[in-house]
Image (cartoon, rainbow, N blue to C red):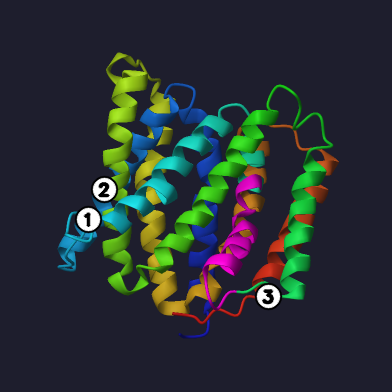
Amino acid sequence: MREAKTGDILLLTLLGLIWGSSFFNIKIATYSYEPFTLALIRVIFASLPLLILCKYKKIKVQAFSKNWKPYALIGLCNIAIPFTLIAIGTAKINSYLAAMLMSTTPMSGSILAHFFTKDEKITLLKSIGILIGFLGILFLFFDKLVINQSNFIYVLITILGSTFYSIGGILTLKLKAKGNENVTTSTTLWSVIFLLPLSIFFETPWELTPSVESTLSLLYLGVVATGLAWLIRFRILTVNGLVFQTQVAYLIPIFGVLFGYFLMDEIITWRVLISLIIIILGIYIVKKNNKGIEK
């Protein structure tokens, strides 16, 4: 892997910008779309560039091969469930809060990796980083303007969504030899299969009359924040490696807070800013002490 150049850093920043912007777009999309339908349309839009990429590179998509079960499980845990839970949570909380809560994924992932992988054990310093990060989240609960009785359960739902991302990440490690394009496309297709009947049965999407604003946000979420962002992520992984790519975790909550404040007129308190600093510090310590090998 080569040392990061200016172009690589700009591309990483763009990825953080796109993912950080996804939360206020989820918020806008929830004005018209219910959770299952929102997640379904998002993954349908996301699957298009992935299928085109696989066709262009002549990569066989193994979603429905005889070894389909791992792809289905990852599609459920890494896409269908978290996309739905995050849509439910973000509908009732500030978009920047959702971005900050999602930034706990590296920490919850480290805890899960300790128990379910052989080479990602928690060290003393990593434990300190995890503790600091979760203290940053806990600090938010003392800010009644941000988290209160009316949205407390939705905060927990969003955190649960981020935890499923970590679970999906652990499961994906078992398929790392199958190729990123194939795994991502296959799991995305399975997420469509899971979400389609749920959307039809529970939400009757054909009766929706969505606003143009919500539809454009949903289109952005699918094509840009999911499909295009994954292609950018894959390029960074192949050129600069995993360690460099994971630095995007620092940028997502920062951009999420900025978008929430300037575009959504969401209130930013001093507790939010302090919590943001604590969370980023926790992520830094955790990632500084990850000993995984770049691939």
Disc 3 marks a residue whose amino acid type is: Lys
Cβ atoms at labels 1 and 2 below 8 Å apart: yes
> Which residue is farthest front?
115
Disc 2 marks a residue whose amino acid type is: Leu
Q: Residue 106 in the image: state x and y as whole percent.
A: 61, 61
Query: Measured along the vertical axis of the image, is residue 35 above or below residue 12?
Result: above
Secondary structure beneath dot 2 equals helix
Give the dominant element type of the magenta stretch: helix, strand or loop: helix
Badge number at residue 63? 1
Residue stretch in magenta: 101-120
Q: Residue 189 in the image: state x and y as whole percent.
A: 26, 48
Distance between the alpha carbons at the discs numbered 1 and 2: 7 Å
Quarter of the rendering containing residue 239: bottom left
Query: Measured along the vertical axis of the image, is residue 232 above or below residue 210?
Result: below
Secondary structure beneath dot 1 equals loop
Mark 1 or mark 2: which is in front? 1
Residue with the mark numbered 3: 288
**Residue at figure coordinates x 53%, y 76% from the top left:** 118
- Counting residues from the N terminus, which is met first, the one under dot 1 or under dot 2? 1
